[in-house]
Amino acid sequence: MFERDRSSPGIVAAALSVWSVRVHGTRRRWRPWEEEYTCFCCGEGWARDKLQEALFMLPPRAAGELRVQVERLDAVFLRRTHHEPTEGPELAWWHRRC
């Protein structure tokens, strides 16, 4: 429902995959359905932004299942990065990490 009404089919799966690659710092070839979401200007933060949007818009059960996966990745991201004090407080926490 979220993908059909608010975005495009497969967007949550693409965002989760792109966020996972970002979190783990792996280098790999992007799958064809991920490539358009991985450009230099928007690929890094875009994926987590889209996941956050999905968490708010999905029905409770689906959001809960997604939240488990996202929180697991977020925990790794928090361990591997540190706070960037020069970033504005209005940004989401994942945009204020380096």
Image (spheres, rainbow, N blue to C red):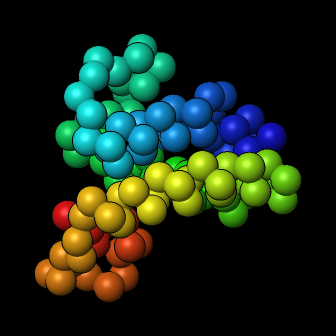
Residue drawn at (79%, 48%) of the image: 62
Of all residues, the one furthest to the left in this rendering is 86
- Residue 74 point in image, percent of width and height: 45, 59
The x and y percentages for residue 13 are 58, 33
- Image check: 66 left or right of 52? right
Left or right: 77 with respect to 1? left
Residue sitting at x 32%, y 43%: 24
Q: Nearer the viewer, residue 17 or 77?
A: 77
Residue 25, image quadrant: top left
Q: Where in the figure is residue 50, as x and y percent of width and height?
A: 52, 51
The C terminus - image quarter? bottom left
**Relative vertical location of residue 68 with respect to residue 91 in this rendering, above or below:** above
Q: Please identify the quadrant where the N terminus is shown.
A: top right
Image height check: is 15 above or below 78? above
Residue at x 27%, y 34% (from the top left corner):
26
Q: Note whether 39 is above or below 41 in the view shown.
A: above
Relative to 6, 70 lies left or right: left
Quadrant hosting residue 36: top left
Residue 97 shows up from this direction: yes
The residue closer to the viewer here, 95 or 61, is 61
Residue 94 % position (x, y): 36, 65
Q: Is residue 58 visible?
A: no
Residue at left 27%, top 22%?
Answer: 28
